[in-house]
Amino acid sequence: MHLFDTHAHIGLITEDPIEQLIVVQEARKEHVDHILSICNNLRDFFQVYDNLKTAAHVYHSVGVSPSEVANLPRDWTSRIEEAIGLPRVVSIGEIGLDYYRKFGNRDSQIELFIRQLEIAERHDLPVIIHNRDAGRDILEILKEKLPSRGGILHCYSEDWPYAQEALKLDLYLSFAGNVTYRNARNLHETAKNMPLERMMIETESPFMVPSTHRGKRNKPAYLKDTAEFIAELRGEDLEEFSETVFRNSLQFFNIKP
Ligand SMILES: [Zn+2]
């Protein structure tokens, strides 16, 4: 079985460089062949990138998340461009809108989001999108500004009608451990009905731990539990399900198998 964890905050699981390497190596024993490392800001990006330089199965996404909108370093665009030149940097993200915790204001979040969508387009990279209580604005902006390499709605959190709109824009939906929660009916409906060719899976570790590990901190090694849950929900063979979702991820990030 092959799995690709398309969203893991390795730097939030642990700050210790050695522990970070252990986390990503341990995941390989649980069939997680590839991991996309995500950071919310550029300081963390360069730190984690450096720590994981020797881990060839770990890819990296660079971007500034909406939580950082009030703390942007003056040179943030040039630092993103610097990161884009590094090996195994394959996407821009996570970027998006978060109206739940009221970071900055709506206009400043939207401006930061759009400017990074433009950077992605300029560098021919796909985007990882964060959405919290901002589903309408996200779709409206993506209708105009989605980069040609496409995007993932990560840690999918909306309902099935919303998913159908997103799929019309050729977006991918990525499910995290919260899909395994018993009361997540909107997520179950979406994961069951959507075309498998548009699906990816992730841990969003250290958050969103699958219900099978309730009470623990999430980590990439737990990704299989989410795969098992969705395959069963869809009535599909776990191996076949995983292969398709794995292939989706490789294609999306333009990674040779
Ligand atoms: Zn995240």
Image (tube, rainbow, N blue to C red):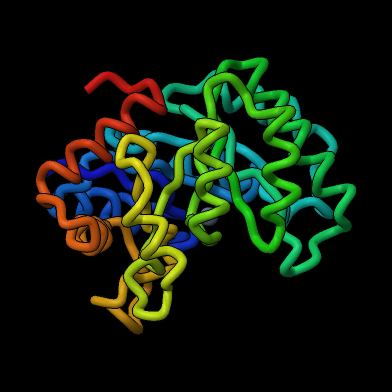
State the residue in front, 115 or 55. 115
Q: Is residue 115 left or right of residue 168?
A: right
State the residue in front, 10 or 248. 248
Q: Is residue 187 above or below residue 21?
A: below
What is the total number of numbered labels drawn onto the structure image?
A: 0
Is residue 50 visible in the rendered image? The answer is yes
- Residue 80 in percent (x, y) is at 66, 30
Quadrant where the image shows the C terminus:
top left
State the residue in front, 9 or 74. 9
Q: Quadrant of residue 77?
A: top right
- Residue 9 in percent (x, y) is at 46, 54
Q: Please tell me which residue is depicted at 77% across the width and 31% down the height of the picture.
A: 115
Q: Is residue 253 left or right of residue 214?
A: right
Q: Is residue 196 above or below residue 257?
A: below
Quadrant where the image shows the N terminus:
top left
Q: Quadrant of residue 19?
A: bottom left
Q: Please tell me which residue is depicted at 53% across the width and 28% down the height of the picture.
A: 150
Is residue 222 visible in the rendered image? The answer is no
| Residue at the farthest bottom position | 215
- Residue 24 in percent (x, y) is at 29, 50
- Residue 72 in percent (x, y) is at 80, 46
State the residue in front, 142 or 25. 142
Q: Please tell me which residue is depicted at 15% across the width and 48% down the height of the picture.
A: 31
Q: Is residue 119 left or right of residue 2?
A: right
